[in-house]
Amino acid sequence: MPIRQLSETMINQIAAGEVVERPASVVKELVENALDAGASRIEVATAGGGLNLIRVVDDGSGMPEEELALAISRHCTSKLGDDILDIRSLGFRGEALPSIGSVSKLAIRSRTRQADSGAEIAVEGGRVSSVRPAPTNRGTSVEVRDLFFATPARLKFMKTERAEATAIADVIKRIAIAFPAVRFSLSGTDRSTLELSATSDDVEGRLARIAQVMGTDFPDNSIVIDAARESVRLEGHVSIPSYTRGNALQQYAYVNGRPVRDKLIASAIRGAYADVLPRDRHAVTVLFLSLDPAFVDVNVHPAKADVRFRDPGLVRGLIVGAIRQALAGAGIRPATTGTQAMMGAFRPGTTSYGHPGPANGHRAYNPDFRAATSAGYEPQRSPFRPLDAGFAEAAQASFDTGPLHSADARAGLTEVAEVLLQTELGAARAQVHENYIVAQTRDSLVIVDQHAAHERLVYEALKNALHSRPVPAQMLLMPEIVDLPEEDAERLALHAETLARFGLGIERFGPGAVAVRETPAMLGETDVTQLVRDLADEIADSDTSDTLKERLDAIAATMACHGSVRSGRRLRPEEMNALLRQMEATPGSGTCNHGRPTYIELKLADIEKLFGRR
């Protein structure tokens, strides 16, 4: 077949295959156009999950009549100058409208603020009508009907109407977080509506918009992020470790105001929470990166969801460092969902443990799990004071308060207790079921899982000891030669000094190979070849060598689990108070190494509600 020039319609349909993946893609492009036009109000209406109808109406600057024909022509845009690296708008390619028009029935009405009347242009399957006058308000209205009617094969790949409608709502929410001063509304044929009222562009307004999208629980369970490194600024909010989700769908990231789904950012979030969350739980985050447009390439994918940073190591390091610093500075905070679950447990008609359901992202704390994990372990010696004879005997009194004190001594103890009541976790009052410490603060009741809490304390102590000095290494009797692609071998060689601190000694061994002479003593016998290849893959992916550090941390976590206070160990009052004080002084002690909560707090006001006193 001879080479021939494709028709304009065919070119647009090919482009539509990249830009218009599903109805949500259309909504994204049209809403971004409205925002680039300076809209303060955007209304979206859909039918049939967006396949039958998508209508986007805005109050932006509008388009003059003479530019409507250009608007539906490929590679025509008002948003890009002469420098492809200087992109300061959401759209810039000039492909969206002609691509949409080539696979649907598209109608655009627009009117500028200065014009007395508006104009309209229509495109049906790539066929363009002439521009004609039309009555319309100031701004732009874009109507898309019968999406993919011109390419019916694409319809076979669409999901259910509800799934497509859900994807559209997700797109609106994701964009709306970055533009809190804009009012958004979404309506569908199922009579469901999404209303996001305008707030403001400051921190409070942004948090209010986040609460509209992610729920009112999030602000109370989040930490503010505000950090900078060189020319990159990071702002936003991240959840405390005890407030999690079962997937990463509620991790929102923005680069210069553009919503992105970037694997480097996702990897950085996982790395920042690696020590405080289990593998099957995910943090809730909203992060805004601001940097010079020349230092980030957004022109790497037609959907503009992927970006490429000039210095990915800098960006990853900023995210990991900022989140970890924020978590450490936030002290210990229980998730408010834990309080809600406890409140529900005391109300008639709730399920076991008062679990309010998966929507709040908090798993009910199951004592049976703790009993199972503690089975087979002997009670261990207290880390706080010598263990008295018979301390853990089953026949021991349920709580030994010691001998009676004189009036003067009791007065002194009262003063000490009053001081403890002012602390975050308060004064220990009792131990129940040989596992839970009940403490009282000035205005709340605190219940602590003694094993989970002490496990975190031991783990942090082991980590500090592990990373404060080079990790002990064991020399291999014979160096192990690992064959790698040349670029991987070169990357490992560049990170050799960092790897040596963690006990892994490597050096170049000719082209395409490295020699491993030492491995971390903590790892014992290990698959050296697989370890080195995993490290090479991670360095290639994110320019870090965290895999080795994570393996060593995992060993420290296992040691902490077996070396901490067991469930079933009875503690004396001074031991319980010592545990509470250490928790207050240890960052991240609100969760154990596996991500489970170490304590739950119930405010006095909530207790009074349970008894009808309020």
Image: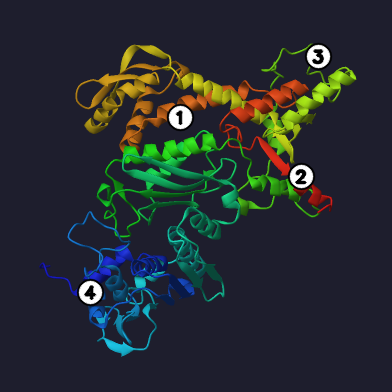
Q: x and y percent of residue 558 in the render?
A: 56, 25
Q: Note whether 407 is above or below 614 in the view shown.
A: above
Image quadrant in which you'd find residue 604: top right
In the rendered structure, the answer to whether residue 412 lies left or right of residue 478 reads right
Query: Quick one: label 3 or label 4, which is nearer the N terminus?
Result: 4
Q: Which residue position is annotated with label 4?
A: 73
Q: Secondary structure at mark 2?
A: helix
The tag on residue 390 is 3
Comparing labels 2 and 3, the label whose residue is closer to the camera: 2
Look at label 2 and name its amino acid: Leu
Cβ–Cβ under 8 Å for marks 1 and 4: no
Q: Note whether 189 is above or below 230 in the view shown.
A: below
In the rendered structure, the answer to whether residue 40 lies left or right of residue 403 reads left
Cβ–Cβ under 8 Å for marks 2 and 3: no
Q: x and y percent of residue 370 in the render?
A: 69, 33
Q: Which residue position is annotated with label 2?
A: 604
Q: x and y percent of residue 289 in the render?
A: 38, 48
Viewer-proximal residue, 432 or 221?
221
Q: Secondary structure at mark 4?
A: loop
- Quarter of the picture holding the N terminus: bottom left
Look at label 4 and name its amino acid: Ser
Q: Note whether 379 is above or below 347 in the view shown.
A: above
Query: Quick one: label 4 or label 2, which is nearer the N terminus?
Result: 4
Q: Note whether 257 is above or below 475 in the view shown.
A: below
The tag on residue 269 is none
Separation (CA) of disc 4 from disc 2:
65 Å
Separation (CA) of disc 3 from disc 4:
86 Å
Q: Which residue position is annotated with label 1?
A: 550
Cβ–Cβ under 8 Å for marks 4 and 2: no
Cβ–Cβ under 8 Å for marks 3 and 1: no
Comparing labels 1 and 4, the label whose residue is closer to the camera: 4
Q: x and y percent of residue 255 in the render?
A: 36, 52
